[in-house]
Amino acid sequence: MLRKTILAALLAVAMLAGVAGAQGVLRVGSDVTYPPFEYVDEQTGAFVGFDMDLIREVGKRLGMDVEIINTAWEGIIPGLLAGHYDVIISAMTITDERAQAVDFSDPYFATGQVIVVRADDDTVRQPSDLAGKVVAVQIGTTGQFAAERIDGVARIDHYPTMPEAFLALRLGRADAAVADELVAYEEAQANPGVLKVVGTPFTVEYYGIALRKGRADLLRDINRALAQIKADGTYDEIYDKWFGGY
């Protein structure tokens, strides 16, 4: 009888925990200055983009509400480690260096770095053509790291956000910018006849959702949700919504 009573109590606790989880909030850090992955809708003020739709779908699968916390890129990993949010989704490339500080989900997006120049510039076609040029990048991104590996670059200018790096290029303060492929195409489409993407991606990278180390339970649940989203076609729907025109 005692064993049955204990088992019943444990089941009750488990059920309560499940309800609490369903009513919980998944706090998400993101630098929402990176269209089409995360940005602010100028008309509604809402946080929108591929990553935003994906993480909200993940939250739905976990039975949790999603709270997006807009965070500057430079402080986004420190903010996670300090407990300001539970996860990061922000077009963050999985790298060995970052993986020393945080855990990553299974990859959810493949990309690569490309070069953006002004539309009237025919001197740059590939990374080696950036020798002697000034290159604009967002600080702390894999775009910066990729630019630093190109031989002969005259100077690399670091900007807090990618839109600021693109602005520097448009204004002639830089000769080129290095950015994630679809972010670059989004900018070029937004500025027809002003900017263009040249060549093809010269790196291969994968985005992941970052978590503090030691959150094996949450990591497992997120990976399970991502797998479900890909398997049932929801991922394709979100992808087509944001990238069907590319």
Image: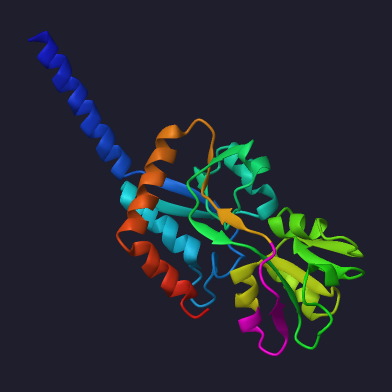
Question: Where does the image place residue 65, in percent across and percent down from the top left?
Answer: 37, 51
**Which residue is at a point 23% across and 27% down the rendered structure image?**
13
**Which residue is at a point 36% across and 49% down the rendered structure image?**
225
Does residue 54 show up? yes
Q: Is 190 within the magenta?
A: yes
Please say if 138 is above or below 191.
above
Colour scheme of the picture: rainbow
**Which residue is at a point 77% across and 72% down the rendered structure image?**
126
**Which residue is at a point 84% across and 81% down the rendered structure image?**
123
Image position of 50 (left or right of 9): right
Relative depth, front residue between 16 and 179? 179
Image position of 119 (left or right of 41): right
Please say if 180 is above or below 243.
above
Relative depth, front residue between 37 and 115? 115
Question: Where does the image place residue 131, in percent across and percent down from the top left?
Answer: 89, 68
Question: Hey, which residue is sitting farthest top in the picture?
Answer: 2
Image position of 222 (left or right of 139): left
- The image quadrant of residue 73 is bottom right
Q: Is 240 within the magenta?
A: no
Please say if 63 is above or below 16.
below
User: How many badges with numbers are in the image?
Assistant: 0
Question: Where does the image place residue 209, in percent across and percent down from the top left?
Answer: 51, 49
Image position of 190 (left or right of 17): right
Relative depth, front residue between 7 and 205? 205
Question: Where does the image place residue 72, in percent across and percent down from the top left?
Answer: 66, 55
From which residue to which does the magenta span run? 188-202
Q: Quadrant of the N terminus?
A: top left
Does residue 30 show up? no
